[in-house]
């Protein structure tokens, strides 16, 4: 079938959340369009500390690349997405393809992605006393994949200034497109329920993914 793949990571401040709650409008829309959507759980704190959460995501990406063909996937077209803490992990994974620091035991596996989608993401450090970089700001690179970043300007949990700063710094470094959609009046977790605003975001994500795929195939 060679279906494109979306790997999605939920939010929850790295301490809570589950794969069946968030971003359902995005997952359902893309699945109807023929995508293979993988909504994954990951170990939560305090049972795991960073980069354990990221290692789990990279294992999912590695699994899709190695085993996805058995489910009709095109393992060369993998987008990674996430909400809140999941946006942090998706962004970090997109910026550290094949980095052995974050791939213990599978250092040689290709974990690169076609594009990154971050919904109301957190882009700061993860306070776990870790000795490795834990903010996406620390791993910006000029060959970063295309990014789609969206955030509500009324978000009181993860303030919009963080998204603005991340987008600005990423655009200064990356040679690839960084799309930013700021949503007037939107709060945190705007993708939990269907709404006109959420549908507009899904439209944007679908257009972004189609554009990235067309460029990569061309």
Image (tube, rainbow, N blue to C red):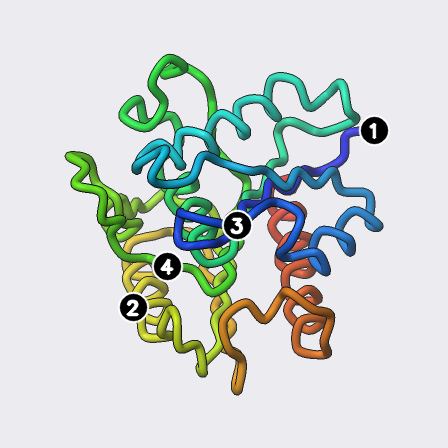
Q: Quadrant of the C terminus?
A: top right
Q: Nearer the viewer, mark 3 or mark 4?
A: 3
Q: Which residue is mark 3?
A: 17
Instruction: Determine the CA span between mark 2 and mark 1.
Output: 39 Å
Give the mark toward the camera: 2 or 4: 4
Answer with mark 2 or mark 4, whichever residue precedes in sequence.
Answer: 4
* Nearest to viewer (mark 1 / mark 4): 4
State the residue position of label 4. Answer: 122
Question: Helix, strand or loop at disc 1?
Answer: loop
Q: Choose between 45 and 206: the one closer to the eye.
A: 45
Dot in front, 1 or 3: 3
Q: Label 2: few (<14), some or many (≥20) within 10 Å?
A: few
Q: Which residue is the extreme one toward the bottom?
A: 185
Residue that carries the numbered disc 1 in the rendered image: 1
* Quadrant of res 202: bottom right
Question: Dot 3 surroundings within 10 Å: few (below 14), some, or many (20 or more)?
Answer: some
Q: Are marks 2 and 3 in contact (CB under 8 Å)?
A: no
Task: From this view, report whether residue 102 is shown above or below residue 126.
Answer: above
Distance from the alpha carbon under mark 1 to that under mark 4: 35 Å
Q: Residue at x 38, y 69 (%)?
A: 158
Earlier along the polypeptide chain: callout 2 or callout 3? 3
Which tag, 2 or 1, sits closer to the chain's start? 1
How far apart are the two marked residues, 2 and 4, measured between alpha carbons?
A: 11 Å
Picture quadrant of residue 213:
top right
Q: Position of residue 66 (x, y in %)?
A: 60, 17
Please state if 26 lies on the left or on the right of 81 as rendered: right
């Amino acid at each position: 079938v060679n279906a494109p793949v979306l790997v999605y990571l939920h939010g929850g401040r790295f301490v809570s959340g589950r794969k069946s709650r968030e971003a359902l409008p995005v997952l359902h829309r893309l699945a109807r369009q023929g995508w293979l959507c993988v909504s994954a759980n990951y170990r939560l704190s305090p049972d795991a500390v960073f980069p354990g959460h990221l290692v789990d995501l990279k294992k999912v990406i590695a699994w899709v690349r190695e085993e996805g063909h058995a489910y009709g996937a095109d393992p060369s077209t993998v987008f990674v997405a996430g909400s809140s803490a999941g946006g942090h992990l998706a962004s970090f994974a997109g910026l550290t393809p094949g980095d052995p620091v974050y791939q213990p035991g599978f250092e040689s596996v290709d974990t690169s992605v076609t594009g990154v989608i971050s919904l109301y993401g957190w882009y700061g450090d993860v306070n776990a006393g870790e000795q490795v970089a834990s903010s996406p700001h620390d791993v910006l690179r000029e060959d970063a994949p295309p990014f789609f970043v969206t955030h509500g300007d009324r978000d009181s949990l993860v303030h919009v200034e963080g998204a603005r700063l991340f987008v600005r710094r990423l655009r200064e470094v990356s040679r690839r497109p960084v799309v930013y959609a700021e949503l007037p009046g939107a709060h945190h977790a705007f993708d939990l329920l269907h709404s006109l605003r959420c549908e507009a975001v899904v439209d944007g994500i679908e257009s972004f993914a189609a554009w990235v795929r067309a460029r990569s195939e061309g």
